[in-house]
């Protein structure tokens, strides 16, 4: 019996290590230093989003790289991707979707109440930290507001129509990441975090609620610096 338990434990460890290595490989592909502009000009970044195979990890990376583009415009040190900040970011984005709130403060789960609660849980060694959040949807619209009506086609698929009756397509990953960054850059407190030289580490993560019409997207950026 002990042998069986040990064998099962070994299998679990091997699976966990495999998952970790796969994650590292993904991050290595998406977050290589000094490649923000290259990443954003790749074909995948200009692919229209499909709900059937929506790659939220790719969107997260696109947001990260757009953030570094904004830093480069000001000749600031580029952010380094930091996995523990990614973990705290995805935690908060998923909680905002799960409990349907949009706020830096999680009033439902005391353990995860504030940005510092979440960020320091994964790494207590920061000397500076901050958080940005944003929400939007996946539709490719212009301006600051969206006017639409939804309609089900004969095949059961849901489409969104503008005031002229034309179908509103989904964004590409590039377009969506650019729009989300634009929202932050148009907000002085969020812009200040993005361009703050006190931070050199960054994790970005979004979560989606496909039950909402249109599909709801909530994203978090966590910033930090360590000694």
Image (cartoon, helix red, strand yellow):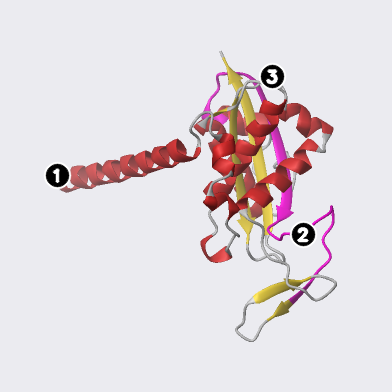
Secondary structure beneath dot 3 equals loop
Secondary structure beneath dot 1 equals helix
Q: Is residue 157 left or right of residue 43?
A: right
Secondary structure beneath dot 2 equals loop
Say whether residue 101 is visible. Answer: no
The quarter of the image holding the C terminus is top right
Label 1 environment density (alpha carbons within 10 Å; few <14, some 14–19, many ≥20): few
Mark 3 = which residue? Answer: 197
Work out whether residue 203 or residue 89 is closer to the camera in this orientation and state it: 203
Kindly give the residue lying farthest to the bottom in the view shown. 154
Label 2 environment density (alpha carbons within 10 Å; few <14, some 14–19, many ≥20): some
Residue 125 within the magenta-colored segment of the rendering? yes
Residue 94 within the magenta-colored segment of the rendering? no
Query: Which of the two labelled residues, at mark 3 and mark 2, occupies the earlier sequence position?
Result: 2
* Residue 31, position as x, y percentages in the image: 50, 35
Q: Which residues are magenta?
A: 121-150
* Residue 171, position as x, y percentages in the image: 67, 58
Q: Residue at x 63, y 49 (%)?
A: 174
Label 3 environment density (alpha carbons within 10 Å; few <14, some 14–19, many ≥20): some
Kindly give the residue lying farthest to the top in the view shown. 227
Which mark is in front, 3 or 1? 3
In space, the residues marked 3 and 2 are separated at their CA atoms by 33 Å
* Residue 176, position as x, y percentages in the image: 67, 51
Q: Residue at x 71, y 61 (%)?
A: 139
Query: Which of the two labelled residues, at mark 1 and mark 2, occupies the earlier sequence position?
Result: 1
Q: Tell me the number on the disc at residue 3.
A: 1
Q: Residue at x 77, y 59 (%)?
A: 141
Mark 2 = which residue? Answer: 141
Give residue 50's quadrant in the image.
bottom right
């Amino acid at each position: 019996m002990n042998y069986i338990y040990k064998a099962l434990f070994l299998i679990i460890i091997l699976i966990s290590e495999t998952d970790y290595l796969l994650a590292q490989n993904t991050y290595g592909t998406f977050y290589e230093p000094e490649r923000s502009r290259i990443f954003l000009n790749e074909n995948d970044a200009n692919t229209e989003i499909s709900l059937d195979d929506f790659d939220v990890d790719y969107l997260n990376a696109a947001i990260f790289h757009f953030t570094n583009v904004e830093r480069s415009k000001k000749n600031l040190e580029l952010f380094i991707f930091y996995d523990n900040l990614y973990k705290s970011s995805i935690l908060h984005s998923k909680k905002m979707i799960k409990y349907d709130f949009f706020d830096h403060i999680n009033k439902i789960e005391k353990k995860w109440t504030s940005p510092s609660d979440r960020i320091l849980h994964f790494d207590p060694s920061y000397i500076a930290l901050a958080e940005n959040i944003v929400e939007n949807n996946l539709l490719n619209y212009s301006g600051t507001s969206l006017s639409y009506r939804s309609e089900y086609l004969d095949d059961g698929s849901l489409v969104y129509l503008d005031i002229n009756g034309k179908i509103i397509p989904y964004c590409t990953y590039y377009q969506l990441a650019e729009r989300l960054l634009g929202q932050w850059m148009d907000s002085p407190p969020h812009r200040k975090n993005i361009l703050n030289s006190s931070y050199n580490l960054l994790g970005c993560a979004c979560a989606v609620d496909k039950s909402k019409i249109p599909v709801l997207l909530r994203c978090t950026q966590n910033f930090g610096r360590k000694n």
